[in-house]
Image: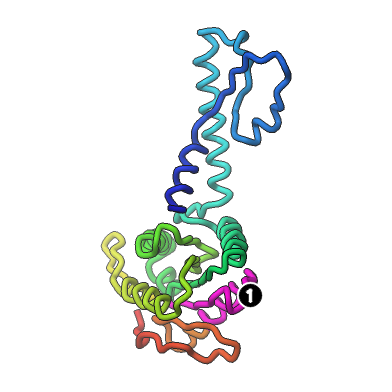
Amino acid sequence: DAQESRGLGDVYKRQPLILLSIESFALDEVKLFELGVQDVWSLGDVSDVLFPKLIEHAIVRKQVEYQTRHLAHYDALTGIANRTLFQDRLDHSLLHARREGHVVSLLTVDLDRFSVINEHYGHDVGDQLLKQFARRLSDIVRRSDTVARLSGNNFAVLLEHMANEHVITGVAEKLCSAFNQPYFIGDHEIFCSISIGIELASHVDYEGSQLLRHSELALRQAKQDGRNGYRFFIANLCLLYTSPSPRDS
C-alpha cells in the first residue's frame, strides 16, 4: 500500500549510511550524498578504533538532517503535513490522476468558532485542541489519504481514488458526526464542530490552485449557512447536498 511504502521509506531515510570502498577509482561523492550517504571512506583508511567514531558521527549528522527536513515539511504543533508538503503531494496526486484517469477529491476543514475558544480558554488550550483535532482527523480518514494543516485552524484532507460524490458525502457526514463529540482538555469539556468545503479535481481539469480555491469557497459557504456542515462547490455556489443541521458549539 502506498502509505505503508511511504512510511517504510521514511524509516530508511532516518538510517545513517557510510560507504566503505575498496575501489581505487574516484567515486562521485556529490551524487552519493544526494542519495543519503553521510560519509565515504577508503576501506584501507578505517581502523577498528576509527570505525565506531565514524558510526557515531554519521548518526548525529543523519539526525540533524532528518529533523531539518521534518521541520520543513511537517507542522510543528500537530505533527501532520504542513502546507509545503501538502502542495507537493497535491501536485503529485493530480499529475498521477490525470495520467491514470483517476479522481482526486479535496476537503478543506475548519474548526467552528475556534477564535472564541482561544479567547475564552487561552492559547494553550487552543493549541491542545488543534493537536487533538489533528489526531482525530488522521484516525478517521484512510492511511493513504493526506491530512495537512494549512494555517491556523484550517486543515485539508486529500482523498485519492474517490470519485463517487455519494461516497465523499458519506466521508463528510462521518467527519461532522465525529467532531460533534467533545474534546477533553485538562478540566475542560469543549465542543467544537467543523465546516467542510469539497471539490473534485475532475471539475477543475486537475488544476491544483483552482481545486484549493473552490474547496475554500465551498467552506466559506458552509460557514455562512450556519457551520457544522459541508458544501460541494459548483460555479454558482448552489448546493449539491444538504448538510447536517447547524448546531452551535
Q: In the rendering, at what x and y percent does residue 44 appear?
A: 61, 8
Disc 1 on helix, strand or loop? loop
Q: Quadrant of residue 113?
A: bottom left
Q: Please state which of residues 121 and 221 is positioned toward the viewer in this rendering.
A: 221
Q: In the rendering, at what x and y percent does residue 215 appear?
A: 55, 76
Magenta segment boundaries in residue numbering: 195-220
Q: Is residue 218 magenta?
A: yes
Residue for point 62% across, 17% down: 21
Q: Is residue 136 left or right of residue 76?
A: left
Q: Is residue 71 left or right of residue 138?
A: right
Residue for point 50% across, 69% down: 154
Residue for point 59% across, 65% down: 94
Check the image and report above or below for 165 versus 236: above
Q: In the rendering, at what x and y percent does residue 120 appear?
A: 39, 71
Q: Is residue 210 left or right of residue 128?
A: right
Residue for point 57% across, 81% down: 217
- Quadrant, the C terminus: bottom left
Residue 65 in view in this figure:
yes
